[in-house]
Amino acid sequence: MTATTKSRLAVSAFFFLPGLCFASWASRIPDISARLGLNSGQLGQLLLAIPAGSLASLPLAGWLVHTWGSRRTVLLASVLYAGFLPLLGWAGSFWTLAPALALFGLAGNLLNIAVNTQAIGMQQFYGKPIMGSFHGLWSLAGFLGGALGTVLIGWHQSPLHHFLLVLVLCLLLAASAFGYTLRADVGGEATSGLSLRRPDPYLLRIGLIAFCGMMSEGAMFDWAGVYFQKVVRPDPTLVTAGYVACMSTMALGRFLSDYFTHRFGTVRMLQISSGLIVSGLTLAVALPYLLPAVSGFLLIGFGIASVVPLSYSAAGRATSVSPGVALALVSTIGFLGFLLGPPLIGFLAQLFTLRVALGCVAVVALGIGVLAALLKAEPEAATQPAATVPL
């Protein structure tokens, strides 16, 4: 196995790790919510702790990636993200779970920025789209994490024991992969941090597309299980069916996204993705029964599969700032959608119903297609691979 292949596998491992952690939390939200006696509004308030922690991490993330490099930051953030997970299972009240979620959000955003900086370096070396495969590993981890949650729920294992098992798996994965990650970041000689000047319209538009896509994705992670539990009401062993269906097609779609992006182009792929999300949500909300709801969530998974990889790849091709700075801007805007969407759904569900709240997500998903149609000529992707990969 070549050094380049080992580096790609190592970066892939650090995409798999956060997907497994977040999916583990998401799969146990119905259990934890029921144990703490939370209604939809209280759960929405609680989930605001995650974006609060994420926002608090932004200056720290920029400083660490610039000063330490993405390599060491990835290791630190991975250990923290997995290490904070058992705190979520240990918390016994609203007030103990809220700070634990804030720490979880802080570590998650730190890892998100650092690992995508690594991915941009690998993509520049290959000289072709490979971002979809990295995010496919994140989604595959989401699918496997949801499946693991379903099994452990069936075995009557507590969230704390579940999360401790995931912590051990993540530490082993990080220890085995860290030595092969990229030692130097691309664009390190360019702008060292986010400038105070207004970003160019291209990056802002890409950031808003990522925001809409990740809001839809976050809604599936945090509310799919709750929607099936409270609205679809299947057999208790099938409460995670919608979540697992969405994660499975999201993972498959991301592994296929590079091929279809090359064939149809970025704008067309974003418009197709928008249509699939809207169609799936409409089906699941209009017909809240097991088979149509699962079918709808399958469509949603295919729809959200390409949005984030396309957004991050486009950010990495920006010419106005260095790839790392462009990625930090776009990923921050997008990640805010991922984190702010779920608590907003909780508030809407409290004011109206959960079906109405998810219907509003469909309106947000329409924005992906509208914004994609406004994209003008994009910066050209690299056509030649780099001479060496910084190992």
Image (spheres, rainbow, N blue to C red):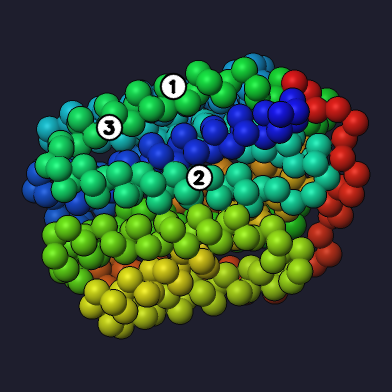
Could you tell me the amino acid type at mark 3?
Phe
Give percent across and percent down for residue 5.
71, 33
Q: CA distance from mark 1 to mark 2?
A: 17 Å
Could you tell me the amino acid type at mark 1?
Leu
Q: 10 Å neighbourhood of mark 3: few (<14), some, or many (≥20)? A: many
In the rendered structure, which disc, 1 or 2, sits on the residue that comes first in sequence?
A: 2
Give percent across and percent down for residue 250.
49, 59
In the rendered structure, which disc, 3 or 2, sits on the residue that comes first in sequence?
A: 2
**Mark 2 and mark 3 in contact (Cβ < 8 Å)?**
no
Image point 71% across, 62% down: which residue?
259
Q: Is residue 179 visible?
A: yes
Give percent across and percent down for residue 137.
53, 45
Task: Classify residue 312 as left or right of residue 244.
Answer: right
- State the image quarter where residue 207 is shown: bottom right
Q: Residue furthest toward the bottom?
A: 286
**Is 223 placed above or below 78 here?**
below
Mark linked to residue 172: 1
In the rendered structure, which disc, 3 or 1, sits on the residue that comes first in sequence?
A: 3
- State the image quarter where residue 368 is shown: bottom right
Image point 58% across, 21% down: which residue?
178
In this figure, which residue is indicated by the disc labeled 2? Answer: 138
In this figure, which residue is indicated by the disc labeled 3? Answer: 163
Q: Is residue 66 visible?
A: no
Image point 27% across, 45% down: which residue?
149
Image point 11% across, 49% down: which residue?
34
